[in-house]
Image: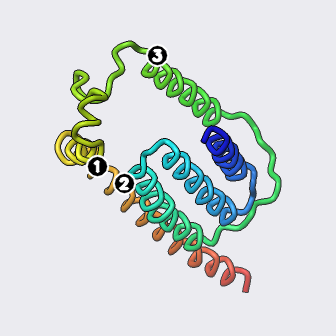
Amino acid sequence: MLIAFYIFAFLAVGGAMSVLLLRNPVYCALSLVGTFFFVAAIFVLLNQEFMAAIQLLIYAGAIMVLFLFVIMLLNLRAEGPRKFHMGLPQILGIGLTVALLAQLASVFVSPKSVMGPMGTYSVERVAREGSVEIVGQLLFTEYVLPFEVISVLLMVSVMGAVVLAKRRPRDEHEGEEEQA
């Protein structure tokens, strides 16, 4: 069991690294799908079959279809090498990343970090009621607003990709007309 965990963890990290290192966006998306499958396998090893199913259905299924749709719609190609320069946006991005990692680390180190409001979801209660019921109850009662905001955000991102794809061919045709 431990050996299988290490194998799947190694493959998941390898898939994530290939997402970062590959130049072709389609290959990156396929590597991300592989990473999602390996993470789902880790969930199965941890006896979290529901999380593995959600991982495959939501991320490997729906989200990756959305990513591939956007990649194909925008007609992205592998980019050649380009120079990297450190400007204000890069410095702000690095600063924001460090701040978010510090916030995340403080959450995990804090003694007050518990599941749910005021620690109402102990290990015994989760074992008694089942984690699926608790997740569903939380998702559709206390966290319904963030759930709906994420769905609107995904819809707006698809609409933005369509708008960007519509503008690109028109701009290319205008440049051809000016040259003629």
Dot 2 or dot 1, earlier in sequence: 1
Q: Nearer the viewer, residue 165 or 43?
A: 43
Dot 2 or dot 3, earlier in sequence: 3
Q: CA distance from mark 2 to mark 1?
A: 10 Å
Q: Residues within 10 Å of mark 1 (few under 14, many from 20)?
A: few
Q: Which residue is mark 1?
A: 147
Q: CA distance from mark 1 to mark 3?
A: 27 Å
Quadrant of residue 156 within the rendered picture: bottom left
Asked whether, in this view, residue 36 is left or right of residue 131, the answer is right
Q: Which residue is mark 3?
A: 109
Q: CA distance from mark 2 to mark 3?
A: 31 Å
Quarter of the N terminus within the rendering: top right
| Outermost residue to the front | 1
Q: Which residue is mark 2?
A: 153
Q: Amino acid at mark 2?
A: Leu
| Outermost residue to the left | 141
Q: How is the image coloured?
A: rainbow
